Image (spheres, grey):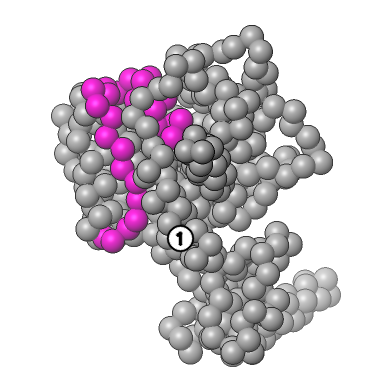
Amino acid sequence: MKSIEKNMKINFAVTCIIATLACKVSAKCFATEFGYPCCTKKVDPVELNEDGVWGYENGKKCGIERNRNPFRHSKHPWNNFNEKRGNIYNMNKWKNYMDTMQKLVIDYIPEGIDERSDDVVYPEVIKTTYFSNTTQTERKVDIVLPVNYKENKKYPVFYYLHGIFVDPDYMLQEELGTLPIYGNLLHQKLAREMLIVIPDQYAPLKGHEFPPELNQDYYDGYDNFINDLVNDLMPFIANNFRIRTGREHTAIGGFSFGGRNSLYIGYVRSDLFGYVGALSPAPGVTPGVDQWSNHKGLLSENELVAKIPPIVTFISGGTNDPAVGTFPRQYSEILTRNHQEHVYLSIPGGEHDPFSNKVGFLNFVMSLFGNLKHIKEDSESDSESDSE
């Protein structure tokens, strides 16, 4: 009896402490003055203004701390770009970056870029698993390491999503060019060193697994991938590899259904992903009908808006694609109506095939992690040399 009474007292005391802390947090939440909640956990700061330092939690803006010196932003400690405190999103830093990409995109495969060469060392692939609390299962993931990967160096991460009915290994087939293209770009110094993480996109809740068919019951398992990605896979990668964190160092892209989910996740979680690539994206981000299904849409057309503008949003699609038809162009038109800056590449004669995948992959990888600034400087230097 005494033990029960003691436990009751302890529980009551803990409850009182939690309630007191909650009241203090609520009372001190400066953000409510401006119509926002305060962040309930540690998040990366993405905005600094005269009112305070702001972040995003579960896709919604929240306050981190009040700016107590609003007229001296440059001296505010959160205004420094460093990984220990997080990166503040600086719009001016990436101004005109997508304009540069628009000028540099190509709608073809340069000769040899998608083939292996004897004088080039290609990336290593690690095939492993991680436990997902979201699905309550052990899940496959393939991780492409850059050539000469060093465990004491930090790397940005590109999450590369496969299409429907396949698994991570599918994206490593030679005909899709993932390893040859990335390896050749690295060799020619046309891409940044990065980890390419290829997960299993089908992530149904336990007890909600369905046969692979083109219907909403099966699509639900893909729609749930966002929760596995954010809550399970990304922490696994961060805990097992040395990576650079923050949206400036994190990309998401994919082909077909992977392109669909990349566009959706990249815009809903624009606090996590700075680069978004939708290669021949399938329908379903917004409501639509194709030859197989009536897609309910994960967002309405008006909701396809990133709360933090992506550094790159890239959409590509073939003009003769029998699988996704004109949906890539339709997504581009929706983004245009919503005043969302992006790059759209129409691939002449492209179908829903390895060629279209490779063209999209090539352009997107070359754009990642500020690489186009380096390519533009080199091309301008070459042009000056040619004119002399």
Kindly state the secondary structure of the residue where label 1 is placed: loop
Residue at 51% x, 38% y is 388
Residue at 53% x, 62% y is 93
Of 344 and 385, which appears nearest the observer? 385
Task: Name the quarter where the N terminus is drawn.
Answer: bottom right
Q: Identify the residue position indicated by label 1 in the image.
A: 95
Q: Which residues are magenta?
A: 338-363
Residue at 61% x, 32% y is 189
At label 1, counting other C-alpha atoms closer than 10 Å, the crowd grade (few under 14, some 14-19, many 20 or more) is: few
- Above-or-below relation of 83 to 262: below
- Tell me if 80 is positioned left or right of 347 in this view: right
Q: Residue furthest top?
A: 118
At which x and y percent is residue 139? Answer: 58, 31
Residue type at the position of mark 1: Lys
Q: Quadrant of residue 190?
A: top right
At which x and y percent is residue 226? Answer: 47, 46
- Above-or-below relation of 244 to 57: above
